[in-house]
Image: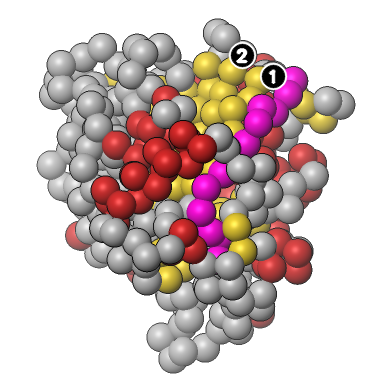
Amino acid sequence: MRPPLLLRITFAALAIYFCGPVKAEPSAAASVRLPFTRSALGLAQTQGMADPASGRRVTADDPVRVASVSKLAVAIAVLRLVEQGRLDLDADVARWLGYPIRNPAFPDRPVTLRLLLSHRSGLRDGIDYALPLDATLKEALAQPAAWDDAHPPGHWFRYANLNFPVIASVMEAATGERFDRLMARLLFAPLGLDACFNWTTCSDRAINHAVVLHDATGRPVRDDLGGHRPTCPVVPGADGGCDLAAWRPGQNGATFSPQGGMRISTRGLARIGQVLLNNGRIGRTRLLSPASVDLLLAPLWRFDGANGDTEGGFYCSYGLASQTLATSQAGCRDDPFGDGLARTGHAGEAYGLRSGLWIDRAKGQGLAYFITRVADDAPKGSSAYTAAEEALAQGR
């Protein structure tokens, strides 16, 4: 459904402001904004084209690569495995991987899932975390550049995508299941979602409705599928090979992009938000216990002025792959809503996209959104978020 004229003009103005003048609507940014409550989804506000090349308009049911919001979904699956007794948040992950994961500067400090999920493990994105199919996590983590040699695990916060290939490797080693299929079994199938990581378990219909990601100039940079499944849904091996039969549990958790490769519709994202608003349950389906939802969303780290890298005030309160917004601490600018209210969820940024899933547990309300064609250096609003994200968060 198309939004009111004033809202369409606002989004068109944003597209011109961030991307330069456009010749026609098909080249404009695509965006979806969907508010929800514990029991109902609101009216979706949509703008632009899911696929400008074909002229297909975006809808709230079109799957999009939501970038780091994927991390929150992974954390839900991890806690399901914790509840089943197959994982332990505080055990040394060497227990499952069969080899030690250690910061070379602090060899006596074990790394746990709790530290990995909360970005306090000591890992940093000093190496490429998108490992080729035939790479091994063990070899990748042997590189000193993968580690922060100034801070031991357990205290210092440094956001690092590299944490999540380790988490996915642990999940695979504990279950013997491939990460993409494991996420389908633990999260997408129970909620009836046509969602996936790297397109492998999504339906043909989802493939046909993919949102093509464009950079600020309008160049397609991800998921320009043309209705066809990608011939290689992962980073090919060093020899160019893409034989997924070579997969081994726990060997390379980066294969299916656990740090940001989830494809899901805005409506599907809102459904995950409803699960969290309802303390782990939606309808007759219970994914998590209320205690696990509390554990997921409670901050494990809060910026005190000198205990982590906030990336310009963007990250100031963080739990198990969950951000808490509106931190009242000098240097924090983590309130894209601009009202000072506490919200939990996660933001995403990659390939010209900005996304978010946020819930206000006290009010029983939430919001899922994304917008494409946002430049890497797009102007900020009054927070550390871009003006485009603030417009979606605030509904203007």
Q: Which element is circle 2 on? A: loop
Q: Nearer the viewer, residue 220 or 362?
A: 220
Looking at the image, residue 210 sits to the left or right of residue 251; the answer is right
Looking at the image, residue 76 sits to the left or right of residue 336; the answer is right
Percent across and percent down for residue 28 are 42, 57
Name the residue at 30% across, 52% down.
Answer: 16
Name the residue at 56% across, 14% down.
Answer: 361
Q: Are marks 1 and 2 in contact (CB under 8 Å)?
A: yes
Residue 106 visible in the current orientation: no
Q: Which element is circle 1 on? A: loop
Looking at marks 1 and 2 on the same chain, the residue that comes earlier in the sequence is marked by 1
The way the protein has been coloured in the rendering is secondary structure
Tell me the magenta residue range: 39-51
Callout 1, which amino acid?
Arg
Residue lying at the far bottom in this picture: please name it: 239
Q: Which residue is mark 1?
A: 38
Percent across and percent down for residue 261 are 51, 57
Percent across and percent down for residue 299 are 41, 20
The image's mark for residue 364 is 2
Dot 1, crowdedness within 10 Å: few (<14), some or many (≥20)? many
